[in-house]
Amino acid sequence: MKRILLGVVALVCALGVVTTTASAKIYEIGASTTAAAPSCPENCRVVTKTTALQVSTGGKAYPITVPTAGRVVALSLQLGSLTVSQVRRLNATYGGTPRVQLTVLSQDSRQKPKRLYTAKAQSEVFRVTDYLGTTAQFPLERSLEVAKGDFLALTVPTWAPVLSVNLDDANSWRASRASRCNDEQIFITQTAQLILDREAAYKCIYRTAKVTYTATMISTPKARKLEDESSSRDDTSRRTSTTRRTTTTTR
């Protein structure tokens, strides 16, 4: 047993000489220095029955864009505080308790001018009643694979107090609604992207407002190609042979 352990230690030490660090990087996508608190319970505005895509925060365009390939591992929400009567009324109006899920959107060159997005992946549904009035982070049961250029949106199948309002014009978000953007009827009509691989039009933009969510992503570490030992020995032999010939010629 002792000889085996010594052998393992020797191997680890040997590997330590030739390996390099290939670390992943952690991103908080959607994070901003712009102060934005949910509007509820005063002047209470909520997101209802749609998928919300933040398109500008503090003047930064599409702050929810994925910067590099990786996996999304958590969703964070700033949730407004509501009274019991407010919660009951909203539950009755919008078909249930407040719920959200994270949705990965993709967009190709055909879709871009039409403001179409395809739902590429989606987290489980989070029921958030018990977290109203707090900032809560929800780890995903299964991480979501993302590619550079994807977008992270917040799907709200019922309602959620995740809306900061009365900000300046540098803040805006889009909803997966094709028309009637401010019609009272559209707010109770289900327009959320709930089925994967389907596209939806994000024609409705809501200015001076911010949806208060972020997502935690871990980038994929870049792989390091292992050097073939036989090739390494051949290269060493060639360099040694060349050195010897050079030395002989000099003499």
Image (cartoon, grey):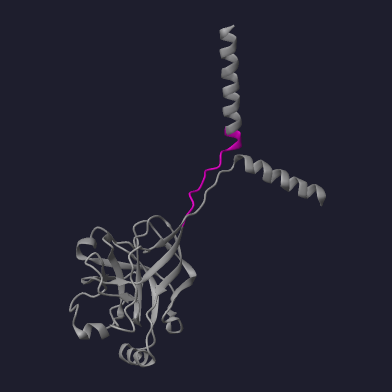
Q: Quadrant of residue 50?
A: bottom left
Residues 197 and 129: in front is: 129
In the rendered view, does 128 fall on the left or right side of 17?
A: left
- Return the residue nearer the eye: 64 or 37: 37
Vertical relation: 69 (above or below) 204? above
Q: Residue at x 41, y 80 (%)?
A: 133
Residue 65 image point, x, y percent = 34, 60
Query: How many numbered marks are there?
Result: 0
Q: Which residues are magenta?
A: 219-231
Q: Is residue 56 left or right of residue 223?
A: left
Q: Position of residue 229 (x, y in %)?
A: 61, 36
Residue 164 point in image, percent of width and height: 30, 74
Residue 102 in which image quadrant:
bottom left
Q: Can residue 21 be seen in this snapshot?
A: yes
Q: Give the quarter of the figure containing the C terminus.
A: top right
Residue at the outermost right position = 2
Instruction: Reply above or below: 24 against 87.
Output: above
Residue 195 in view (yes/no): no
As for residue 224 lying within the magenta part, the answer is yes
Magenta span: predominant SS is loop
Residue 233 coordinates in the image, percent (x, y) = 61, 30
Q: Tell me which residue sits at (60%, 21%) in the image.
A: 240
Q: Residue furthest top?
A: 251
| Magenta highlight on residue 203 | no
Q: Residue at x 37, y 59 (%)?
A: 66
